[in-house]
Amino acid sequence: MQQEALENQGKDFAHNWVSSSRFVWFCQVFIIIAFVLGGCYSLYAHRYKGKPEVNVPENTLYNPKYK
């Protein structure tokens, strides 16, 4: 039983520091890239579409026109 534990210790995620740190690093890189791409898509989807046509009452202009 002890021999099996020692043989599997190198393959276990918790005991192999090199492979676990590499896995965590790749997870962090993937998550950062996913957030950046998601933010870029959100900015693209909610971008400024242009100057809207707004009807302004004539009595509120800089030089108002009264009846």
Image (cartoon, rainbow, N blue to C red):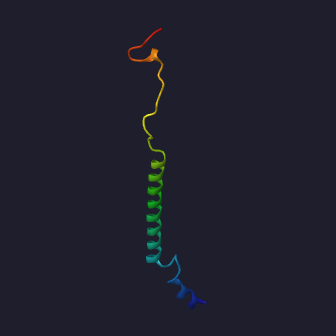
Residue displayed at 47% across by 74% down: 20
Single out the residue that lies furthest toward the right. 1
Q: Is residue 16 above or below residue 61?
A: below
Q: Is residue 54 above or below residue 48?
A: above
Q: Is residue 7 left or right of residue 51?
A: right
x then y, percent, for residue 33? 44, 61
Viewer-proximal residue among 31 and 49? 49
x then y, percent, for residue 57? 48, 19
Residue displayed at 48% across by 79% down: 16
Q: Is residue 33 above or below residue 19?
A: above
Viewer-proximal residue among 38 and 8? 38
x then y, percent, for residue 60? 45, 17
Viewer-proximal residue among 31 and 56? 56
Res 63 → quadrant: top left
Res 2 → quadrant: bottom right
Residue displayed at 54% across by 85% down: 8
Q: Is residue 66 above or below residue 19?
A: above
Single out the residue that lies furthest toward the top. 67
Picture quarter with the N terminus: bottom right
x then y, percent, for residue 58? 45, 16
